[in-house]
């Protein structure tokens, strides 16, 4: 089983990475789980313009990190999304990449485990955390949770490591992911109705 931890910060080994790495350290102790931390990088990401081309091509016409991310998520059994908090939301380039990665192959995410982690100096964690979870709930993904909302606090990796409750939450979240992976591995897939679309036009 594979767990993909996505570092949605433009800083490769900053606060968000520190939180994700605490999760990875627990997951790496499991013989049946492979982990990968994927950094989205610091290049610009073009926002989705709803052209619909990805529905035909299976990828975005703008060949940025969103296409790489989509492929990596396709191959994973569990996906952990990590982002810094900017103005009570997630990193803008990360949001653009996620919008496109989830939209271009929306059917592949069903029944994969999702979890989200946010890193903030002080406030805004709740709304950023909620934004990340919405990618999972619209994609029919079960969400792993811990003993609190998944956030760490600090302005530097060193300060994040001093957030003993936040770091414990990362370890607890990792154990929830392990439990879900092991219990869902041999579970029959839920039967679903085909999606019905309706536009609110009178």
Image (cartoon, helix red, strand yellow):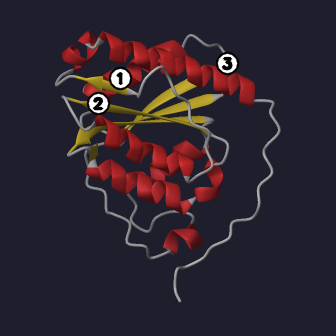
Dot 1: few (<14), some (14–19), or many (≥20) neighbours within 10 Å? many
113 relative to 87, above or below: above
Q: How many labels does the image show?
A: 3
Q: On residue 32, which mark appears?
A: 3
- Left or right for 163, reference 31: left
| Percent x, y of residue 137 | 55, 48
How far apart marks 2 and 1 lie (CA) works out to 8 Å
In this view, the mark in front (3 or 2): 2
Question: From this viewpoint, is residue 33 visible?
Answer: no
| Percent x, y of residue 84 | 27, 36
| Percent x, y of residue 10 | 25, 40
How far apart marks 3 and 1 lie (CA) works out to 22 Å
From the viewer's side, name the closer residue of 28 and 174: 174
| Percent x, y of residue 130 | 40, 43
Task: Tell me which residue sits at (43%, 73%) in the image.
Answer: 50
- Left or right for 188, reference 84: right
Q: In which quarter of the image is residue 15?
A: top left
Q: On residue 19, which mark appears?
A: 1
Which residue is tagged 2?
119
Tag 3 secondary structure? loop
Task: Tell me which residue sits at (81%, 30%) in the image.
Answer: 186
From the viewer's side, name the closer residue of 6 and 137: 137
28 relative to 68, above or below: above
Task: Tell me which residue sits at (42%, 52%) in the image.
Answer: 98
How far apart marks 3 and 2 lie (CA) works out to 28 Å
């Amino acid at each position: 089983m594979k767990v993909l931890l996505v570092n949605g910060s433009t800083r490769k080994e900053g606060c968000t990475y520190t939180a994700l790495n605490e999760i990875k350290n627990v997951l790496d102790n499991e013989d049946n789980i492979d982990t990968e931390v994927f950094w989205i990088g610091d290049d610009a990401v073009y926002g989705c313009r709803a052209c619909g081309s990805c529905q035909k091509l299976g990828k975005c016409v703008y060949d940025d990190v969103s296409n790489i991310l989509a492929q990596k998520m396709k191959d994973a059994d569990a996906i952990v999304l990590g982002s810094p908090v900017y103005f009570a939301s997630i990193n803008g380039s990360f949001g653009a990449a996620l919008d496109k990665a989830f939209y271009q192959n929306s059917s592949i995410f069903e029944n994969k485990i999702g979890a989200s982690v946010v890193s903030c100096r002080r406030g805004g964690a709740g709304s950023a955390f909620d934004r990340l979870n919405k990618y999972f709930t619209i994609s029919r993904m079960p969400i792993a949770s811990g003993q609190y909302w998944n956030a760490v606090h600090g302005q530097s990796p060193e300060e994040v490591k001093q957030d003993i409750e936040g770091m414990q939450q990362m370890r607890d979240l990792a154990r929830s992911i392990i439990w879900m992976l092991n219990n869902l591995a041999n579970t029959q897939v839920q039967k679903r109705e085909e999606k019905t679309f309706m536009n609110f036009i009178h």
